[in-house]
Amino acid sequence: MGREGITYEQVVEVAIKLSNESEKPTIRRVRSELGDTGSMGTIQSFLARWREENQTHVLANSEIAPEIQIALSSAINANIKKVTLNLESAISIANEEISVFRDENFVIEEKLDNERKKNKKLIQEHDKLSGKLEKSIEDYSALVLEKEKERKDSERSRTELAKIQVKMDSFKEKVDELRQQNEMLLNKFEVSQVEAINNDKRATLAEAKIESKDQQIMYLEKQLNK
């Protein structure tokens, strides 16, 4: 059903006007002349009806025998309907495929967004651990200096040196543990980067498929409007 205000007579009037101006009355041109109103399907239906009636009128005014005119008109109309149905079916299938590609692209974009968030979190954790590692190294260096000082101080007892050694060993273990955690985070970050690159490729492929289907639809619409 057409939108309010769009009638068969209006479509015919615009089609005749475009034909007189040596322009092909396509669906888009007719809709533009109507002020971009009315559905594409309704305009297409009215144009098909007008072409059919126009062809019948031409045949009726020719010198061809009536039975041949009827046969020609029937063949032409049947061919028009067949081509129209085939084009509409192809457009419908293409639109469905585009819808699927868009859904897939949305999922890929969502995964990419999640990967970006994970990467950001990993970077923050890496920076945090790096800060802890630097602080631990500074503390360890301070203990080394302290031990060296104590060694030079003959008045220090072996008990105090042993305590310092225990602290140094404890800090060394913490430093090793922080280094291991930092390496694990770096590995996770690299894996996440690879996944993000793969998702970017999938998104690019999905967009290329959508563009290809859009071009197919434009081509089919041109064929339908011929």
Image (cartoon, grey):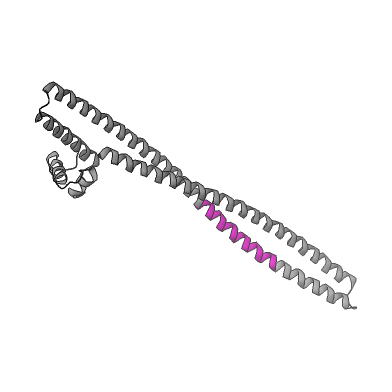
Q: Residue at x 32, y 43 (%)?
A: 218
**For residue 202, side relative to residue 72 (left or right):** right
- Where's residue 10, x and y in %? 13, 43
SS assignment for the magenta stretch, majority:
helix
**For residue 35, side relative to residue 220 (left or right):** left
The total number of labels drawn is: 0
The residue closer to the viewer here, 192 or 12, is: 12
- Quarter of the image where the C terminus is located: top left
The residue closer to the viewer here, 146 or 181, is: 181
- Where's residue 22, x and y in %? 17, 46
Residue furthest top as drawn: 67
The residue closer to the viewer here, 169 or 137, is: 137
The residue closer to the viewer here, 171 or 39, is: 39
Q: Is 210 rendered above or below residue 174?
A: above
Q: Residue at x 43, y 43 (%)?
A: 209
- Quarter of the image where the N terminus is located: top left
Please tell me in which quadrant of the rendered image residue 15 appears: top left
Q: Residue at x 65, y 53 (%)?
A: 187
Residue 120 lies within the magenta run: yes
Residue stretch rendered in magenta on the structure: 113-134
Q: Residue at x 23, y 27 (%)?
A: 78
Residue 169 lies within the magenta run: no
Q: Is 25 rendered above or below residue 186?
A: above
- Where's residue 158, x and y in %? 90, 71
